[in-house]
Amino acid sequence: MHVKGRVKTRHRRRPRGSLTRDHVVDAALKLADDEGLVALTMQSLAKRLDCGVMTIYGYVEDKEDLLNAISQRGLRDLRLIEPVPGDVEGILIHWGRALRLLLIEHPSLPVIFLTQAVVGTAIFRGLERLLGRLGEAGMAASTAVHAIYAVVIYATGFVAWELPRTRLQPQSEYAADWRRGFANLPPEDFQLTAQVLGELSRVAGEEQFEIGLRALVAGLSRARVEQRSRHRTVKGNVP
């Protein structure tokens, strides 16, 4: 009996012209968030989009351009829950909380922000809106821009610290790591640390973030008051 060989079916890729830059960027952001930034390559992205690698280069110049684009795409999801406070400290705290939640939602973003400069339209639009709110609350733009980036740097660094400790694993596992690490130490040499061992698993979560955010914003507010006071003093001494 003659048995015919199995006929291989040819995989058909998506039709030419069915992609847009937005499709590419959205897919790249989801891939990076789901599997980690290391997993985002032109090859893996092409596979997810069901197209050839060279097709990707029709929409992005290179990997740096792609990372810049997915950063700005992710920032479009940043939302300030209304009502937004009307005072400077309240605005910065409200915005800092929203930024942390966004970075947790898109865990690829903190890594990108910490490893390359990201500049683009989405950045300028967000900055313009925030400068406007802070200006309405009485903070000059030249002061507000530094306050904004103090919060950006803090939130980005904190989430990069938080993710592997209490987001990508249960907080209970992080607590167990501390207990295991402490178990083999001579207790007489670490009596004070023993008293706070149960607190150490809480240094990478919302409570710790709030402590740092409030301290940072309070410091920015004090610096603003001191700056205004010095300005009035100098102005008063001018003959």
Image: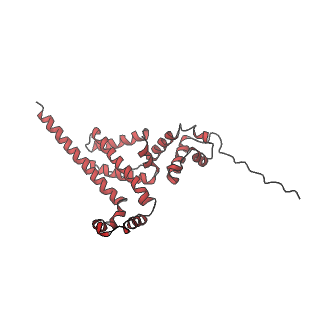
Q: Split into 4 quadrants, where in the image is the N terminus?
A: bottom right
Compared with 136, 184 (above or below) is below
193 lies left or right of 101:
left
Measured as percent of width and height from the top left, residue 167 is found at 43, 59
Q: Residue at x 39, y 39 (%)?
A: 124
Give the farthest residue toward the right: 1
Q: Is residue 182 left or right of residue 29?
A: left
Can residue 76 be spotted in the picture?
no
Quadrant into which the C terminus falls: top left
Say whether residue 232 is visible.
yes
- What x and y, as percent, mark residue 113? 42, 45
For the image shown, how many numbered marks are present on the structure? 0
Residue 168: image x %, image y %? 46, 59
Q: Residue 96 location, x and y as percent? A: 35, 51
The correct choice, above or below, for 24 with respect to 238 in the image is below
Q: Residue at x 20, y 45 (%)?
A: 225
Q: Residue at x 61, y 48 (%)?
A: 47
Applied colour scheme: secondary structure
Which residue corresponds to the image point at 33% horizontal and 58% vertical from the top-left? 208
Q: Is 209 or 177 nearer to us in this picture?
A: 177
* Residue 33 appears left or right of 80: right
- Which quadrant of the figure has residue 51? top right
Q: Nearer the viewer, residue 71 or 170?
A: 170
User: Is residue 41 found left or right of 223 in the rendered image?
Assistant: right
